[in-house]
Image (cartoon, grey):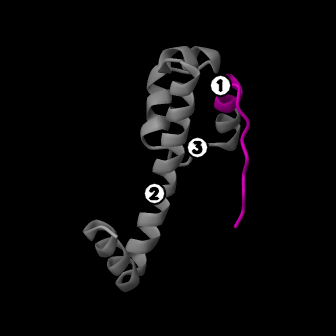
Amino acid sequence: MSDLKKYINARKKKDNEFARGFDGGYEEFKIGLILKSAREQSGMTQEELAKKIRTTKSAISRIENHADDIKLSTLTKVARALGKKISVKIM
């Protein structure tokens, strides 16, 4: 385990607010990375994707870089435009 992971784990154990913020921020970041990866694998630019779902390139950039509070309907539009499906799990 890296020093960074050790620090994060120790800090999360000591500070509940940090743990909640870190985990929530990571999930938002991860969604953006998944969407960006799917777009790149499809060979589409941000601009091309934006046109397909009738939005702007800057909106796609915001989603990919910090997907906070993204609507499920928006995720579905993006997935369909990329030829993918959305799967939601409650754990």
Which of the 4 image quadrants contains residue 4?
bottom left
Quarter holding the N terminus is: bottom left
Q: Which residue is painted at 54% across and 41% down in the image? A: 34
Mark 2 — residue? 26
* Left or right relative to 30: residue 78: right
Magenta stretch: includes residue 88 = yes
Mark 3 residue crowding within 10 angstroms, few (<14) / some (14–19) / many (20+)? some
Q: Nearer the viewer, mark 3 or mark 1?
A: 1
Mark 3 — residue? 70
Amino acid beneath label 1: Leu
Q: Position of residue 79 (x, y in %)?
A: 67, 32
Query: Observer-nearest residue: 4 or 58?
Result: 4
Q: Which residue is painted at 54% across and 46% down in the image? A: 31
Q: Secondary structure at mark 1?
A: loop
Do residues under tags 3 and 2 come within 8 Å of each other at their CB atoms? no
* Left or right relative to 77: residue 1: left
Magenta range is: 77-91
Q: Which residue is painted at 48% across and 41% down in the image? A: 33
Quarter holding the C terminus is: bottom right
Q: Position of residue 14 (x, y in %)?
A: 35, 85
CA gap, disc 3 to disc 1? 17 Å
Which of the 4 image quadrants contains residue 39?
top right
- Please determine whether, in this image, residue 82 is positioned above or below residue 90: above
